[in-house]
Amino acid sequence: MIVVEHRDRGTRFGFTSIEQVLAMQGRRLEVAFPKDTDDDLMNDFVSVITSMAARMYGRRGSRQKAEHMKQCVEQVMKQEI
């Protein structure tokens, strides 16, 4: 048995397909907090949008961290000159 907190922790989309494949192997996929809606397509759509948003914000955060590191290095270089 595989236990996940939310459906999107098991897979970003196609949860039902994964669940069926595991069932054919004699395994189960249990969700601690069941889905919000009964529409699988809508749940998959929300998961995809959530995943894209997380990547977008993650990239932005990485870009900001890189810029901050660059500024720190430039400051150190100015102090050494």
Image (cartoon, helix red, strand yellow):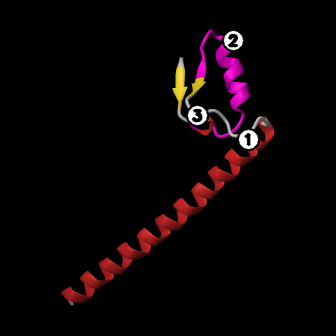
Q: Residue at x 56, y 62 (%)?
A: 57
Which numbered disc, 1 or 2, marks the residue that appears first in the sequence?
2
What amino acid is found at the position of numbered circle 2 in the picture?
Answer: Met
Could you tell me how far apart the alpha carbons at marks 3 and 2 are, in whole angstroms? 23 Å
Residue 32 found in image quarter = top right
Residue for badge 1 = 44
In this view, the mark in front (3 or 1)? 3
**Mark 3 crowd level (few <14, some 14–19, many ≥20, 10 Å Cα):** few
**Mark 2 crowd level (few <14, some 14–19, many ≥20, 10 Å Cα):** few
Q: Looking at this rendering, what residue extends furthest in the top direction? A: 26
Q: Nearer the viewer, residue 11 or 68?
A: 11
Residue 76 found in image quarter = bottom left
The residues colored magenta run: 9-29
Q: Secondary structure at mark 2?
A: helix
Work out which quarter of the rendered image holds the N terminus and state it. top right
Residue for badge 3 = 33
Could you tell me how far apart the alpha carbons at marks 3 and 1 are, in whole angstroms? 16 Å
Residue for badge 2 = 24
Which numbered disc, 3 or 1, marks the residue that appears first in the sequence?
3
Q: What percent of the width, then of the height, locates residue 54?
A: 58, 55
Seen in the image, is 31 located left or right of residue 41?
left
Look at the numbered discs 3 and 2 and tell me whether their residues touch, using CB distance below 8 Å: no
Q: Secondary structure at mark 3?
A: loop
Q: Is residue 63 above or below residue 58?
A: below
Work out which quarter of the rendered image holds the C terminus and state it. bottom left
Could you tell me how far apart the alpha carbons at marks 1 and 2 are, in whole angstroms? 22 Å
What amino acid is found at the position of numbered circle 1 in the picture?
Answer: Asp
